[in-house]
Amino acid sequence: MEKPTGTIFYQRKPSESVCRVVQLPCEHYADVGKLRMLVKWLLNKGHSSFVCTLCPGGAMPWQGLRLVLDLPEDELRECERELQRNSQQPSLLSKCPACSRLMQRLSKSELIVTCPSCPCSGGKDCRFCWDCLREWTGSQGDRCGYSDCSSLLLLRSCSVIESVRSAVHQCPRVRKCPGCQNLLGHAGGCNNILCPYCRCSFCYRCLTVSPRHSPSCRIQPNPSVL
Ligand SMILES: [Zn+2]
Ligand SMILES: [Zn+2]
Ligand SMILES: [Zn+2]
Ligand SMILES: [Zn+2]
Ligand SMILES: [Zn+2]
């Protein structure tokens, strides 16, 4: 893995005879061959953020970079594996709810995330809420339009029950009732629970609606796309 030398980023479009260039989301240009080398070199060195050197302080989110890099499928997969390994804060990576490609946000305060020319949204940008992973409906940039946004975030990010002798060992601490969709936790006892809101009986492990389910079933994760 070599670090590319010479000019990578250009203020204006250089002549095609110099190198094959692509336009970046910041509207600068880059030598695509060297940019690919640079990204692979950075990933190899354990980095998880990418900047255009002509844009001080402006990092490029992975989804925009991926589009201009246009890597072959196997190289792309390898890069994304490395990116996930390198990312210090897993909360900065997620997957697009429409096309399930890897998405990166640049700061924890960013709530609307845009997947550029997402193929599943008819070539349009897919804008979604990072917390609940639904299409963006809010009017303000820092407020999701769904009132149950924070409960979905809780489902996606809650820790698991650590109780080796319990039938619900390793199950998420918060579950959504398959009957009424209310959130509830496990209050002790076996894996079969009765929802206090709708009286629906379900298995806390696999979420099957059934009055009695043997605890040998596979633990169903909470809805999450990552
Ligand atoms: Zn730039
Ligand atoms: Zn997408
Ligand atoms: Zn939301
Ligand atoms: Zn219920
Ligand atoms: Zn079960």
Image (cartoon, rainbow, N blue to C red):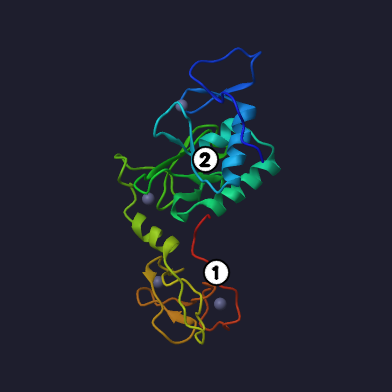
Determine which residue is flagged by label 2: 62
At numbered mark 1, what does the secondary structure look like: helix, strand or loop? loop
Point out residue 87 in the picture as x, y percentages from the top left corner: 50, 51
Residue pictured at 56% horizontal, 72% vertical: 219
Please tell me whether residue 64 is drawn above or below residue 188 in the rendered image. Answer: above
> Mark 2: few, some, or many residues within 10 Å (few <14, many ≥20)?
many
Residue pictured at 49% horizontal, 22% vertical: 28
> Which image quarter holds the N terminus?
top right
> Mark 1: few, some, or many residues within 10 Å (few <14, many ≥20)?
some
Please tell me whether residue 142 is drawn above or below residue 190 in the rendered image. Answer: above
Decide which of 96, 139 is in the foreground and name it. 96
Point out residue 199 in the picture as x, y percentages from the top left corner: 40, 77
Point out residue 46 in the picture as x, y percentages from the top left corner: 55, 49
At numbered mark 2, what does the secondary structure look like: helix, strand or loop? helix
Q: Which of the 4 image quadrants contains residue 3?
A: top right
Residue 189 relative to residue 41: left or right: left
Inspect the image, locate mark 1, and give the three-letter code of the amino acid beneath it.
Gln
Determine which residue is flagged by label 1: 220
Ligand 5 occupies quarter: bottom right
The tag earlier along the polypeptide, 1 or 2, is 2
Labels 1 and 2 touching (C-beta < 8 A): no
Please tell me whether residue 81 is drawn above or below residue 42 in the rendered image. Answer: below
State whether label 2 is within 8 Å of ligand 2: no
Residue pictured at 66% horizontal, 13% vertical: 17
Decide which of 222, 202 is in the foreground and name it. 222
Q: Which of the 4 image quadrants contains residue 161?
A: bottom left
**Mark 1 or mark 2: which is in front?**
2
Inspect the image, locate mark 2, and give the three-letter code of the amino acid beneath it.
Trp
Q: CA distance from mark 1 to mark 2?
A: 29 Å
Q: Which mark is residue 22?
A: none
